[in-house]
Each structure stands twice: as structure tokens, then as C-alpha cells.
Amino acid sequence: MAEQQSTRQTVEQRRAAQAWKDIESVKSSQKEYGSLVRGFAAMIRQDGLGPALAFLAAKGKEHHKALSEHLSRWVLPQMGASGHSDLLQWLLNQDSATYRLAASETLAYLNWLKRFAEAQGWGDE
């Protein structure tokens, strides 16, 4: 049991480290990115991961593209899909169990992005 917790903490630490790098890479549209990150988990829970990612692709503004890239860069390797670069495109060919795992990992990663965006003072006041 202690070994499982240690592994989970390691994953959390890796999530946090990558999320911090991603937050630091946002040089413009910071407030918009922060607002988007704050509401994106709710969008996933309400509409599903696929439709939420499709929303990002459809909007196509800088902060939407940045979040899509950040999620793809983190989630795909966690799912063993390192050869892919777009989470939405990869997700379209997955079974429902894999889809649920990807959604869960995305939500866990979003928690860190949200925390760090809030720490930067980005988003809704």
C-alpha cells in the first residue's frame, strides 16, 4: 500500500512539474488562458472530453490552442500514445474504457494547470 501511494505521489509530482512548465510557456492571452482553464473541467464533466477538445479546436484562438497542446503533451504519453501529437484525433479511435481513463487523466492534470493559473492571478477576478 505504501508503495502504491509513493507511486501516486510521483505521478502527482510529475503532473505538477509539467503543469508549471506549461503555465510558464503562456506568454500572451494569460487572463484568457486562466479563465479557460478554470472552466474547462466543468465542460469535460458536462459534455465529455471529446466535445470539450473539439470546442478548443473550433475556437482556435491562441489560448485555446495552448490548452489543447498542453493537454495533448501530458495526456498522450500517460496513455501510452507517445507517437501521437493531438489528443482529440487519438481519442476518436479509442474504446470507451480508454476514453474514460484519458478523461480522468485530463481532469487530474487540469487541477494543476488551474492551481498554477490561479497562483499567477490569471482568470476571473
Image: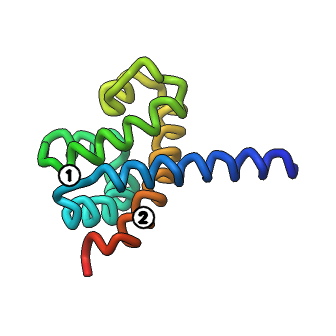
Q: Earlier in the sequence, mark 2 or mark 1?
A: 1
* Crowd tier of the residue under label 1, counting other residues whose Cα lies within 10 Å: few below 14, some 14–19, many 20 or above: many
> Mark 1: which amino acid?
His
Q: How many marks?
A: 2
Nearest the viewer among 17 and 15 is 17
> Mark 2: which amino acid?
Phe
Q: Residue at x 17, y 59 (%)?
A: 29
**Looking at the figure, which quarter contains the C terminus?**
bottom left
Task: Work out which residue is located at the far top of the displayed protein and give it.
Answer: 83
In the rendered image, residue 56, in percent from the top left (x then y), is placed at 21, 45
In the rendered image, residue 105, in percent from the top left (x then y), is placed at 51, 44
In the rendered image, residue 34, in percent from the top left (x then y), is placed at 28, 64
Nearest the viewer among 82 and 53 is 82
Kind of element beneath mark 1 = helix
Q: Residue at x 54, y 39 (%)?
A: 101
Task: Work out which residue is located at the far bottom of the displayed protein and give it.
Answer: 125
Q: Residue at x 46, y 37 (%)?
A: 75
Nearest the viewer among 118 and 21 is 21
Q: Measure the C-alpha gap from mark 2 to mark 1.
A: 15 Å
State the mark number for residue 63: 1
The answer to whether residue 14 is above or below residue 122 is above
The answer to whether residue 54 is above or below residue 32 is above
Circle 2/circle 1 CB separation < 8 Å: no
Kind of element beneath mark 2 = helix
Nearest the viewer among 5 and 116 is 116
State the mark number for residue 119: none
Which residue carries the number 2 mark? 116
In the rendered image, residue 78, in percent from the top left (x then y), is placed at 54, 34
